[in-house]
């Protein structure tokens, strides 16, 4: 990443640390500070700032508004961890493990309130537009999470159903992030639509790349257990495509096993993926989504430096290995 982008990430981190969370009772607000301190890519607020930079100078002026996307994102993570009964988040205990489930629920609710408090700071002339767009996005994210949970109890999920689920659960928030930056910069409706298209397609490629790295990533770089999706029978694009093409029931046998050696299962299922060339199929669809994102990027009309920084960050996301 460029120094410019690194500086923007530092501004986002600084702003998140300065959120007003010194309220009572402390156990309601401490978890917010905790989960925001766990780090992460700051992808979503960064996209807000990079989008703003395409159309207007000094994105530092909208860092606080950009932070609302990170607050909302971490609200969803806090509640998702409860639903998934996840013990760890970025290598640290999840909020409901460190405190308890009730605190995790209520603290997450407060995060949603905080996101709206930040949204109140948007200039009046674009407030309604931002509010309407955010509400539509937030609703889709929740719908996507429910669909993902529904998949857990289904034996069969199609690739098209999976792609629609990740569009809602992951990609629309990246699309909103880009659109928010353009709205704040008062870009034209056509340019707002283009950056939203860019964000959604980057989001699709980003999630599919996560699926791929979970199987084929470098353990030392990926930051979480490689093969975790295989161990959990998580319905990813790779598993769905393999189930469509597997010539025998070897894959299904592994999915049905209750007692197994984790490493053996990961190796066996990965070998099935290799035999079906699932990696290449997944890489191909990732390239399609990133390619569509770049097509939208090519049509942007704005500050050349802003477009260049956005393109460099898109290159980073396309080629990331963690």
Image (cartoon, rainbow, N blue to C red):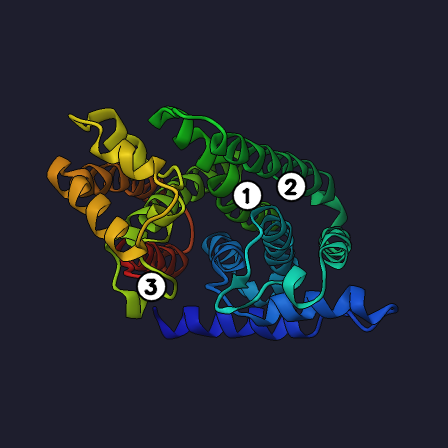
Q: How many residues crowd around disc 1 within 10 Å: few (fewer than 14), some, or many (20 or more)?
A: many
Q: Quadrant of residue 285?
A: top left
* Secondary structure of residue under mark 2: helix
Quadrant containing the N terminus is bottom left
Q: Residue 226: where, in percent of width, then height?
A: 31, 58
Tell me the tag on residue 222: 3
Q: Residue 98: where, in percent of width, then height?
A: 66, 68
Q: Residue 68: where, in percent of width, then height?
A: 65, 56
Q: Nearer the viewer, residue 190 or 89?
A: 89
Task: Determine the residue positioned at 57% across, 68% down.
Answer: 12
Q: How many residues crowd around disc 3 within 10 Å: few (fewer than 14), some, or many (20 or more)?
A: some
* Secondary structure of residue under mark 1: helix
Q: Nearer the viewer, mark 3 or mark 1?
A: 3
Q: Nearer the viewer, residue 13 or 151?
A: 151
From mark 2 to mark 3, how far is it between C-alphas? 31 Å
Residue 300 visible to the viewer: no
Q: Earlier in the sequence, mark 1 or mark 2?
A: 2
Whether tag 1 and tag 2 are in contact, CB under 8 A, the answer is yes
Q: Earlier in the sequence, mark 3 or mark 1?
A: 1
Q: Nearer the viewer, mark 2 or mark 3?
A: 3
Quadrant containing the C terminus is bottom left
Query: Is 258 placed above or below 165 here?
Result: below
């Amino acid at each position: 990443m460029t120094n410019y982008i690194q500086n923007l990430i530092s501004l986002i981190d600084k702003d998140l640390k300065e959120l007003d969370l010194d309220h009572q009772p402390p156990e309601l607000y401490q978890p917010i500070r905790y989960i925001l301190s766990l780090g992460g890519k700051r992808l979503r607020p960064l996209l807000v700032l990079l989008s703003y930079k395409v159309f207007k100078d000094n994105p530092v002026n909208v860092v606080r508004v950009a932070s609302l996307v990170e607050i909302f994102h971490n609200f969803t993570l806090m509640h998702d961890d409860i639903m998934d009964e996840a013990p760890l988040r970025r290598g640290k205990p999840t909020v409901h493990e460190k405190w308890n489930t009730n605190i995790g629920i209520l603290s997450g609710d407060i995060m949603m309130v905080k996101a709206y408090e930040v949204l109140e700071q948007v200039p009046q002339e674009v407030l309604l537009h931002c509010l309407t767009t955010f509400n539509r996005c937030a609703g889709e994210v929740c719908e996507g999470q429910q669909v993902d949970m529904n998949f857990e109890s289904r034996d069969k999920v199609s690739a098209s159903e999976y792609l629609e689920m990740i569009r809602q659960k992951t990609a629309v928030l990246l699309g909103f992030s880009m659109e928010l930056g353009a709205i704040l910069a008062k870009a034209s409706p056509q340019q707002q639509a283009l950056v939203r298209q860019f964000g959604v397609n980057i989001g699709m490629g980003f999630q599919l790349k996560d699926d791929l790295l979970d199987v084929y990533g470098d353990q030392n770089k990926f930051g979480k257990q490689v093969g975790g999706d295989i161990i959990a029978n998580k319905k990813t694009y790779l598993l769905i495509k393999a189930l469509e093409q597997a010539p025998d029931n070897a894959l299904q046998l592994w999915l049905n096993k209750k007692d197994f050696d984790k490493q053996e299962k990961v190796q066996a299922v990965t070998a099935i993926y290799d035999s079906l060339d699932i990696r290449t199929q997944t890489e191909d669809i990732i390239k399609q989504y990133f390619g569509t994102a770049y097509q939208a990027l090519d049509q942007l009309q704005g500050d050349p430096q802003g477009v260049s920084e956005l393109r460099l960050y898109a290159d980073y996301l396309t080629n990331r290995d963690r």
